Amino acid sequence: MSRRYDSRTTIFSPEGRLYQIEYAMEAISHAGTVLGVLAKDGVVLAAEKKVTGKLLDLSGAKEGGYGGSGEKIYLLNSNVIGGVAGLTADANSLINYARSAAQQHLLQYNEDIHVELLAQRLCDLKQGYTQYGGLRPFGVSILYAGYDSHYKFQLYHSDPSGNYSGWKATCIGANNGTAQSLLKQEYKDDIDVKTAISLVLKTMSKTMDSTTLGSEKLEFAVLTVDPETKQPKAKIYRPDEIDKLLESEGLAKKDDDAMKTS
Amino acid sequence: METSFAITGKGYIIVAADTTAARSIVKMKTDEDKIKTLSPHLLMAYSGEPGDTIQFAEYIERNIRLYQIRNNYPLRPPAAASWIRRSLAESLRSRKPYAVNLLLGGYDTTTYTPHLYWVDYLGTMTEVPFGAHGYGSYFALSLLDRYHDPEASLEEGIVTLKRCIDEVAKRLVVTPGKYKVKVVDKDGIREIEL
């Protein structure tokens, strides 16, 4: 019976629900985890890569790529980093849209787009697919880590229904419930970036399915303000930088040495 | 003839515009306000083709207001100036361009700095320490070269402005009679009497 209300995104079920939107959100909770933490002097994002394997060619990701290190974390504008969870193809389309929206704002106002405004622009697009007929909604949730002159550092989350909200720390994708309760326990107001980085990595290591963390499974990015230029500085870590960071946090692979000697 | 001045000082901007509305050789009105308040910290003095000025100024005023309603905060002066300049530049390339010259004075509440922009009907925009439009500018700019001080207090700024107005009154053939003067600083916008 319920299929009567599934086949079109725009039709309410008798209980007043939009099933396709709910399924889209469900799809996201199986996707790779993306985690964000807001600090007083920066924002930290980490993501779990799902598509891995010996034969996957990661030579593009090695250089950090054009604005991204692989699958989940992308530079949306010079002041905003986006972390996506869900269908990668849908995410690519949204990232493209976000980047043009940001550039359009730059062209019109000669200033970087405000983080909330960028989130709003994407949500307007996402909401459209919950209302206009015959089309499937975007199966993507996004975390926006950004900086602007009005509200300084910010972290937003948007989902397929077109809702968005601001957070101090949040998580999307697989195991987001576990991660969020961990964050709720561990998060303190006024933490600095350094503490936020260890909080993110600690939470990631506890929530990810694999037991060990490594650059082949993890993406990582930090947004801070350059002390000299006072401009936002987005840093998406390269694989070797992630490994170095994990080592310094004492979370690197334990079997690394064993592999080298064998 | 139409004249407007604007000068920056320490934490403020003074914008002054004459109050005559003229048609051909006849003064129709002598208390016209040609300085619009675009947002709590942004002023725009406009001059040029009579119908165009009001039409364009109201269009800008309402769109800046719309942005503020939609986003809960007003555009910062640099962003507002860029958008206004673009509007003029797009108008210039249309069938019927607006012939409007502007002086935009605003106080940026996020960086605590005053900004002044000189904009003409061709879509030229420059950030300046002081600016003027109209016939009065030929007399005022050289005076301001000599007497303008970016660190001046508001009282000193007003004295400099009076110098400009007096010089225009002395040398220009058709002198505007009265000026409206507005100040924008950290506390917002207010009108002052000379």
Image (cartoon, rainbow, N blue to C red):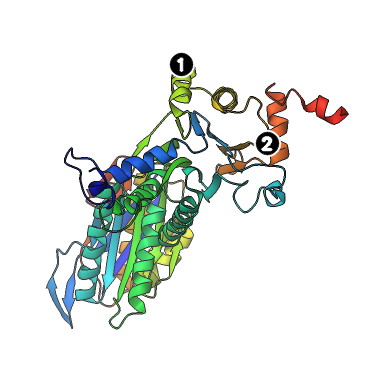
**Residue B12 visible, this orientation:** no
Q: Residues within 10 Å of mark 1 (few under 14, many from 20)?
A: few
Name the quadrant of the C terminus of chain A.
Answer: top right
What distance separates the C-alpha of mark 2 from that of mark 1? 27 Å
Q: Chain of mark 1?
A: A
In front of the other: A172 or A109: A172
Image coordinates for residue A169, horizontal then vertical, percent: 45, 28
Residue B42 located left or right of residue A139? left
Residue A127 located left or right of residue A239? left
Kind of residue at disc 2: Ser
Residue topped by disc 1: A185
Residue A61 located left or right of residue B4? right
In front of the other: A41 or B124: A41
B123 above or below A52? below
Residue topped by disc 2: A215
Name the quadrant containing residue A115.
top left
Residue farthest toward the right in the current orientation of the protein? A261
Name the quadrant of the N terminus of chain A.
Answer: top left
Dot 2 and dot 1 within a common chain: yes
Image coordinates for residue B135, horizontal then vertical, percent: 33, 74
Image coordinates for residue A15, horizontal then vertical, percent: 18, 37
In front of the other: A39 or A211: A211
A255 above or below B98? above
